[in-house]
Amino acid sequence: MSETDNNETQAGTNETAPEAETDTQTAGDGAEAGSGETTPEEAIAKLTAELDAMRDKLLRALAEAENTRRRAEKEVKDTRDYAVSSFAKDMLDVADNLSRAIGAVDQSQLDDAPDAVKNLVEGVEMTEKAMLSKMERHGVKKVDPAPGDAFDPHLHQAVAQIPSDQPSGKIASVMQTGFVIGQRTLRAAMVAVSAGSPSGDGDGGPQAPGDGVDVKA
């Protein structure tokens, strides 16, 4: 082999060696870079956690929106139901006067009264019925308890406790009717509560005012 051939062989060997070294270094860098990458399982777990957080925020937002809607509906309903409260209170005196006028008439005397008087009384009765009907149409209802009914501190106001034939704690007599508007008491009915039999039999006898019945609303 000539000196020229030897030089060409050595040059080829020198050119191949750097390429092999470069490939080895590239493979090493790739392995180091690959060791820091996220695995598919880790990526799925991360996305699942983010999805759960977003779902929780969405549910909270929907719940808050629903609560806001319900509060708004209740406010609108209350405004509609109780808008006439002040007017209704002013009309209670009128209703009371009509009731007193009718109650002052003795039916036995009315039978022998002139037709004009009968027509007048009938007109007052019809006026009272029409008024109560119109008030009820707007949510205002009359509370008219009777003797023997249970005492309800939310609807009745006990102004006295007296001996009566009614069981102790029951309503003995009614002094003034009451009215409610919606679920609220516009005016409590004024009543006297029974303290038991005057003779002291049956229901424990007379009691001091306020005993045996809860008169607080």
Image (cartoon, rainbow, N blue to C red):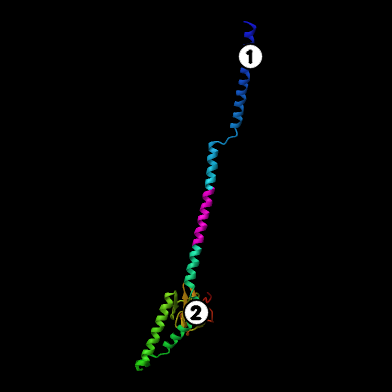
- Residue wearing tag 1: 11
In the rendered image of this protein, does residue 54 appear above or below residue 88?
Answer: above
Q: Secondary structure at mark 1?
A: helix
Which residue is depicted at the point 49% across and 78% down?
87
In the image, which disc is placed on residue 89? 2
Range shown magenta: 53-69
Residue 150 or residue 34, whichever sits in front:
34
Q: Does residue 72 appear anywhere in the picture?
A: yes
Which residue is depicted at the point 52% across and 58% down?
64
The amino acid type, in three-letter code, at marker 2 is: Lys
Which residue is depicted at the point 40% across and 81% down?
130
Is 56 contained in the magenta span? Answer: yes
> Mark 2 and 1 residues: CB-CB less than 8 Å, in contact?
no
The amino acid type, in three-letter code, at marker 1 is: Ala
In primary-sequence order, the first of circles 2 and 1 is 1
Residue 43, quarter of the rendered image: top right
Q: Is residue 48 left or right of residue 21?
A: left
Question: Residue 159's x, y, as percent?
Answer: 52, 82
Q: Please identify the dominant SS of the magenta region.
A: helix
Question: Residue 20's x, y, as percent?
Answer: 61, 20
